Image: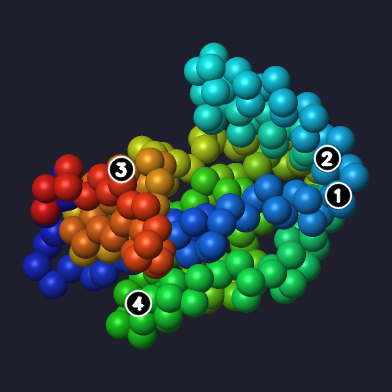
Amino acid sequence: MAGKTLGNAPTLSVFDFDGTLTRHDSFIPFLRFAFGRRRFTRKMLHLVFPTLRCLRRKLTRDELKEVLIHTFMKDIDERWVKEKADAYCRKYFKKLMRPKGLLAVAAELNTGATVTLCSASPEIVLRPFADQLGINLISTQLEVIDGKLTGKISGNNCRCAQKVARLEQVYGPLENYHLRAWGDTRGDYELLSAAQDPHWCHFHSSSAPKKSPLNKIKT
């Protein structure tokens, strides 16, 4: 349920990334771009059985993501991933981003709001996009030791309740802000619930199916 804010509270505007500001997921296409089609396909074969287990609810979505990250990122040089992320952003930024989403981010910045992405995708991949947008970034962090990724998540996957927890770690109690939030999946529900001004699938086409949770949110 959306919390109460103080009078004249500063605005905190929070955007989910994948599917909300983008036309589709960004992480799997990044992996294909970074590793090349042949290497990507070979590594994805290791995900077949874990994916089936997830579909059968023998593996959680977060656990499946851990398998994905371990499969692709274990013992990979951090600098190499950052370079690939920069190149991916330069090549696909315009194709990936929803124009209405870009306008909304710019509008929030123009109002003087504090604007941040809050995403389950890895920080190392999204950093160039956040920098291009000129906004802050809170997202899933990958463990790095001696300049190499270990294939493990550092902390928790930044989705569901973790989005609210991570925001409060950075900005303090959300009740101190007028919180505006944009999301499009179950992983954004807690974030939308915490917002005084929630937006569900706001940049999607009007013909897109929208099974909105907003009717459950009391403002």
Residue 191: where, in percent of width, then height? 32, 48
In the picture of the structure, the residue carrying the numbered disc 1 is: 37
The tag earlier along the polypeptide, 1 or 3, is 1
Quadrant placement of the N terminus: top left
For the residues bearing labels 4 and 2, Cβ distance under 8 angstroms: no
The residue labelled by disc 3 is: 190
Please tell me which of labels 4 and 2 falls first in the chain: 2
Above or below, 34 against 49 in this view is below
* Residue visible at 43% across and 76% down in the picture: 100
Q: Nearer the viewer, mark 1 or mark 3?
A: 1
* First in residue order: circle 3 vs circle 2: 2
Q: In the drawing, what numbered circle is on residue 41?
A: 2
Q: CA distance from mark 4 to mark 2?
A: 40 Å
Q: Nearer the viewer, mark 4 or mark 1?
A: 1
Distance from disc 4 to disc 1, alpha carbons, whole Å, reads: 38 Å
Residue wearing tag 4: 108
